[in-house]
Image (cartoon, rainbow, N blue to C red):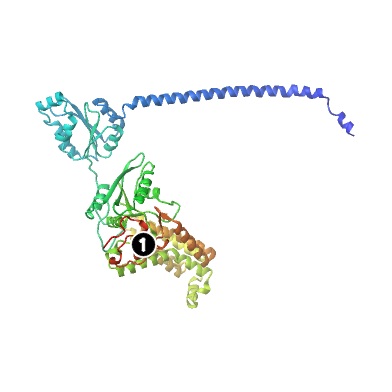
Amino acid sequence: MWGKILSYIPEWKVFMQGFIVFFIPYIIFKLFNGIVSKQKTHEDEMKEINDQTNQKVELEHQKSSQGSYDHYTGDFNLDVELVKNEIGHNWDVHVREFHIGNTDIRAAIIFLDGLSDKELIDKHILASLMGNVLKKDEQESIYEKGVFLQTFIKNEVLSVSDITEEYDVKQSVGKILLGATALIIDGIPNVLMLGTVKGKSRNFEEPVSEALVRGPRLGFTETLSDNTALLRQHGENSDLSIINFQVGKRTKKELVIAYIQEIADPNLIEEVKKRIQSITIDDVAESGYVEQLIEDNYLSPFTQVQNTERPDRVFAALMEGRVAILLDGTPFALIVPVTFSMLLQSPEDYYERWLPSTLIRLLRYLAAAITLFAPSLYISFVSFHQGLIPTKLALSMMGTREGVPFPAIIEALIMEVAIEILREAGLRLPKPIGPTMGIVGGLVIGEAAVQAGIVSPIMVIVVALTAISSFAIPQYNAGISLRMLRFVAMFFAALFGLYGVILFFLLLCSHLVKLKSFGIPYVSPTVPYRASDWKDFMVRMPLMMMKRRPKMLHTKDSSRQD
């Protein structure tokens, strides 16, 4: 059998012929393609190298051609042209060329319409420079004896309080765009930046988001200088330090940090500076940007930086050893570090006597617990643990739920989502109709839902109590965190009942214990336990007993009263 099979196999010559006929042309084809592709690849590489070399040469040429123009040259025409090339395309930039007094020295002022004070420019700059600035003997002393003209104009002519010298073109352009006026003088390789900023700001008003029954009726504005002045006006304090930063890569804004030098922990101050300097975003539109970029854990639902419109709250935090961050263009200042108990406190707690303040503070803690757990407890009792409800109450609840087609979780979600939508709509609507919409809408929707048999009356009561309790939390962002976690607690209750609520509470506590704000435990003084700091925790003790600053802040001076 094997011999018969082998007889059908061709001789080796046939295999050689087949190899020559089929494989050799295929190999030649592949070799040819490889050589061509390799040649093309080499050509592409050479072309890319040449392009990169040309780009580098072009960039170096541009740098070499522009390197001498990064700073002012002293050539009047060239210096004016440099500034025009940077911002001359903007219609609100004005360039005014003139001669200084009765001399032939050319000069120009460059300012921004709208942000610069034209009256100040006309009366104290142009009028001074274009008048009889120099007498004949003074001209001779300037030209012959070499007296520096710019120093003479700066010290003898201009009646402007804020005058600085600037050599860099881009730096001066940035100041012009903020409202300063640049004075270019022929023959002088720098410019004088004149403080002519005329910022428009609103009047000081009572903070809308933090209204008090008793306390100062004064809030921050959108002007940084006004806000720092409010801190200075709080009282004479030479230890109040205010350090300036610029944030934003493309749109630069002024930002300051404020602290009491003899109280605040130096390590905390350095950490705040480090985080501020690490901000590399193009534009910092509001202090909320800073808050999100410097917080410890951006995945946490809890805010780790406190925001406020009240100067008295900020100064009280500074006196405790904290650091405040103020940004130009927003009335909201930031306070770091922050603990959860701070979010449930109000400045009014310290303006009233300690007994009513303690009662109100305890009510806030109760309101926070109701906001977080009331709907989830209702769901767990109705769906899983009916035996834990008193008999009469259980019969009443079952009677009101008769005919409701949805389980407790769906019923709660319908009402909670409706309340959240009404709350958001009330905030976005115009002020005259916003509160009316929230109240009337809630009443109408709740009554209609009960009449239609979609929800039970007791569910409406639970949701209404939850919504009202959330309004008792002083900090708006703290209320948002609890409202968001309320839905998570509801799903835990729908899955596991009361055990799910307990499990959620344990997970929440474990997260809060691990959370920190600028190195300070978020739930301090609970963890770690510090008995001395409990005097201003859930209970506000009398002021004469609060002689020490919080130990958790590691302040230089721990005593605040003798």
The percent position of residue 517, horizontal first and vertical second, equals 40, 54
- Image point 62% across, 24% down: which residue? 34
Q: Quadrant of residue 485?
A: bottom left
The percent position of residue 246, horizontal first and vertical second, equals 32, 42
Q: Is residue 57 left or right of residue 151?
A: right
Residue type, mark 1 in image: Leu
- Image point 9% across, 26% down: which residue? 137
Above-or-below relation of 166 to 240 = above
Residue 454 visible in the current orientation? no
Q: Residue furthest bottom?
A: 392
Across the whole image, how many numbered discs are drawn on residues? Answer: 1
- Image point 88% across, 33% down: which residue? 2
The percent position of residue 362, horizontal first and vertical second, equals 36, 67
**Which quarter shows the C terminus?**
bottom left
Above-or-below relation of 103 to 226 = above
Q: Is residue 75 left or right of residue 485?
A: left
- Image point 50% across, 61% down: which residue? 491
Q: Quadrant of residue 421?
A: bottom left
Q: Residues within 10 Å of mark 1 (few under 14, many from 20)?
A: many
Above-or-below relation of 57 to 544 = above
The percent position of residue 271, horizontal first and vertical second, equals 37, 48
Could you say which is closer to the camera, residue 281 or residue 493?
281
Could you say which is closer to the camera, residue 240 or residue 116?
240
Residue 263 visible in the current orientation? yes
Label 1 SS:
helix
**Which quarter shows the N terminus?**
top right
Q: Quadrant of residue 22?
A: top right
Q: Which residue is mark 1?
A: 344
